[in-house]
C-alpha cells in the first residue's frame, strides 16, 4: 500500500497550520485592551454573570433525551439492514424497543418526568377525592390536619 499521498497531505496540513498561526501572530494586535479579555458573543460584551441556576429536572430531561435520541441511530442501522436480518432482526428490535419502553415507563412512574415542586404535588393529591374525582374545593388546614391525624401521619 502506497502511503506517500497520506504523508504528503499530512505534511501540507501541518505546514498550513504553522504558517497561518505565524501570520496571525505577526499581523495580530500587539496591545492588550481591557475589552480584549472580555467574553463576548457576536461582538456584544456580556452582561451579568454566566452562572445560572438550572433545575435538576432540566438536566434529567436532557439526559433522557440523549438516551432516547441515541436509539434512533440503532434503529436507522437496523432499518438499512432489514432485508439481511430477516425475522431475527425484527425480534432483536422488538426486544430493544421493549427495553426502552420499560425504562421510559419506569422513569415516568418514578416521577423523573414530573417537573412539579413538592408543594404542587401535595396540592394535587389534596384535590383528588374518592375514585380519582377531582374536587373543586380545596381542603382547609383544619381538614388537612384531621386527615393527617386520621391516617396516622402518613
Image (cartoon, grey):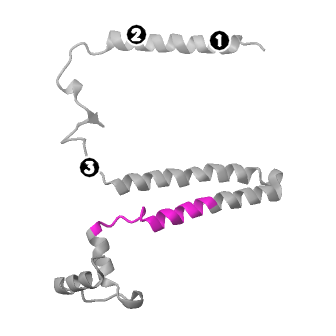
In magenta segment, residue 78: no
Q: For the residues marked 2 and 1, what is the alpha-carbon distance in whole angstroms?
A: 23 Å
Q: Is residue 117 above or below residue 7?
A: below
Element at badge 2?
helix
* In this view, the mark in front (2 or 1): 1
Image position, residue 56 (x, y; %) = 34, 54
Q: Would residue 100 be found to the left or right of residue 37 on screen?
A: right
Q: Quadrant of residue 87?
A: bottom right
- Circle number at residue 22: 2
* In this view, the mark in front (2 or 3): 3
- Circle number at residue 128: none
Question: Where the N terminus falls, by quadrant?
Answer: top right
Q: Residue tagged by mark 1?
A: 7
**Magenta residues (range):** 99-118
Q: For the residues marked 2 and 3, what is the alpha-carbon distance in whole angstroms?
A: 41 Å
Q: Nearer the viewer, residue 1 or 127?
A: 127
Q: Residues within 10 Å of mark 1 (few under 14, many from 20)?
A: few
Element at badge 3?
loop
Image position, residue 68 (x, y; %) = 54, 55
Question: Where the C terminus falls, by quadrant?
Answer: bottom left
- Circle number at residue 53: 3
Image position, residue 35 (x, y; %) = 19, 27
Dot 2 or dot 3: first in sequence order is 2
x 35%, y 64%: residue: 115
Amino acid at each position: 500500500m502506497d502511503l506517500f499521498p497520506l504523508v504528503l497531505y499530512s505534511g501540507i496540513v501541518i505546514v498550513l497550520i504553522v504558517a497561518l498561526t505565524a501570520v496571525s501572530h505577526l499581523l495580530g494586535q500587539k496591545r492588550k485592551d481591557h475589552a480584549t479579555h472580555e467574553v463576548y458573543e457576536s461582538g456584544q460584551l456580556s452582561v451579568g454573570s454566566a452562572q445560572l441556576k438550572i433545575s435538576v429536572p432540566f438536566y434529567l430531561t436532557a439526559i433522557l433525551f440523549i438516551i432516547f435520541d441515541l436509539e434512533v441511530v440503532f434503529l436507522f442501522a437496523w432499518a438499512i439492514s432489514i432485508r439481511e436480518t430477516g425475522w431475527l432482526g425484527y425480534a432483536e428490535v422488538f426486544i430493544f424497543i421493549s427495553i426502552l419502553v420499560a425504562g421510559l415507563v419506569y422513569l415516568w412512574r418514578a416521577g423523573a418526568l414530573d417537573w412539579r415542586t413538592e408543594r404542587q404535588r401535595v396540592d394535587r393529591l389534596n384535590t383528588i377525592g374518592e375514585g380519582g374525582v377531582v374536587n373543586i374545593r380545596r381542603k382547609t388546614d383544619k381538614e388537612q390536619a384531621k386527615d393527617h391525624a386520621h391516617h396516622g401521619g402518613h
